[in-house]
Image (cartoon, coloured by chain):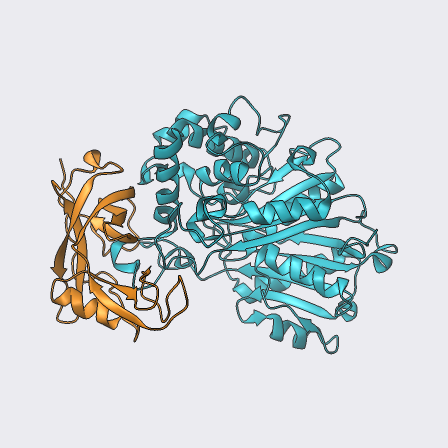
Amino acid sequence: MAKHPFHDVVIAGVFNSQQARVLEGYTSATITLEAIKGVFEEAGVAPEEIDGVSVGGGVLNSAQAAYLLASGPAWRGPSEGRGIAAILEAAAAIATGRATTVLVAAGSAGIYTERASTAPWTRPGNEFVVSWGLFTAAEFALIARRHMHTFGTTPEHLATVSATIRNNGHINPDAIYRGRGPFTPTDILESRMVADPFHLLDCAMTSEGACALILTTAERARNLKNKPVYVLGGGQDAFGPAYHHPPSFDLKGRNGDRYSNGWVGRQAAERSFAMAGIGPKDVDTCEFYDPFSFEIIRQFEAFGFCGEGEGGDFIMNGTIETGGRYPITTDGGLMAFSHGGAAVQLLQRAIRGVHQVRGECKSNQVPGARISMCSNGGAGALFTDIILLGDEQP
Amino acid sequence: MTLTRPQPSDIPLPAPSDVSQPFWDACRRHQLTFQRCNACSGITFIPQPACRHCLSSDLRWEQSQGKGSVYSWTVVWRPQTPAFEIPYAIAIVDVDEGYQMVSNIIGIDPADLQVGMRVAVTFHEMNDEITIPYFQRSSG
């Protein structure tokens, strides 16, 4: 049998810098540098071992990181630290012998200064959305509304997702919103409306922070201190540029309704599961991307955990709580852990997956977790990326 | 009851591209337009350099009747920037010719918005260069 494409790839280190609503005195580059130093220490890897970089920390981009680390010529990842895409590119670079040990990092601080407006990364400038006042909450609300109309999904379903994720952050000592709960679905529904059907507490926060990962070969990882975590599968679905086109549930390509934008991530999930040789029932924790509450419901449907339109009922009755069958976003996610800009929080879904598979979570550790499914994106942004992480070499 | 209104002219305005300039020029004449392919008759919107159905670059501009139905909607209470007056209603409109566009629904009580509601285009001049197409409720 052919070897799994990522048989020889290991995630050997993960690190989150401090996260805060505002990190006084930091820039994107300086906080990213903290995460980079932190991950070297956490992995027990020396800077001179790095021969691949994928970094997005303001002026500290991949090219600058290659120079600063002075580790010699390095493979440079095209996604510049942008989440699961960057991790999968790094894994592929190692699997194909283009790199041995890759640093993936992102961070941001000091870029959200105009507080009367929504965060800069949420405000699209395209001519076919800008004057109608769109921003990310509205884009994702248009997706949610269509699903509610078609399938009868309710504000209470959405609020249950938000309350669950926010309660995960409430008990996470590293979360920015630690101790801010507990929340009931009623608390979510009573928060002020932002973009109908999304109340304030249906939406991600904005914050600052950085994080980093190190990927290396299975051979190199044998002498490292951390329990190795493997890339079992991955996939990336994109329909087009985010925040230009109408964020329509029914935007589709020539392969038809089954893969319309409302189900973006379905093809990526099918391919991820096929690569891993597993299915949704094998997933122990769902470290899904939570820019807005509805997105979790949509992802369960798109990824095949339940049927189309069944996501609202699927997430009720404790299914998505820790202790339930499919615990979601166990660190508190973008709603309560951190949402540091355009890229940091993308990587942090996978970092949480690594923590779960290693059994090292400070809160909400799922006992015996062996497989985590992590996602990025959402239908409001016309893309969804997936990575499956596990403790067994594929 | 607050009815949604056109936005003031100091909101962020579109920066037309070479490809989209004819669309915005037509808006100044109070015409809603889209691209149709001379090769396959397919519609492409938002404006593109080539047909999304067959990749032909032989596209012509056609005028829409400016009628459609609300496909999805949201009402915004936290504006993108302070220049926007709240509340405003964003909708994806299923334009009758067979394509979708984003716009605002003006002149409506937010509580009355519904998927499927019939709407018609109306134009609002922001300055000499830019006229914005909005939609409002219509009977047919």
Decide if residue A244 is on the left or right side of residue A175: left
Decide if residue A362 is on the left or right side of residue A147: right
The percent coordinates of residue A160 (x first, y second) are 47, 28
* Residue A127 found in image quarter: bottom left
Decide if residue A185 is on the left or right side of residue A175: left
Residue at (49, 41) in percent of width and height: A335
Nearer the observer, A330 or B29:
B29
Q: Is residue A165 above or below residue A239?
A: above
The percent coordinates of residue A184 (x first, y second) are 45, 25
Q: Residue furthest top?
A: A317
* Residue A35 at least partly seen: no
* Residue A126 at least partly seen: yes
Nearer the observer, A300 or A28:
A300
Total number of numbered discs in the rendering: 0
Nearer the observer, A370 or A262:
A262
Residue at (75, 56) in percent of width and height: A5
Residue at (80, 58) in percent of width and height: A44
* Residue B22 found in image quarter: bottom left
The percent coordinates of residue A189 (x first, y second) are 37, 29
Q: Colour of chain B?
A: orange
Q: Colour of chain A?
A: cyan
The percent coordinates of residue A103 (x first, y second) are 69, 63
Residue at (29, 59) in percent of width and height: A130
Q: Residue furthest front?
A: B39
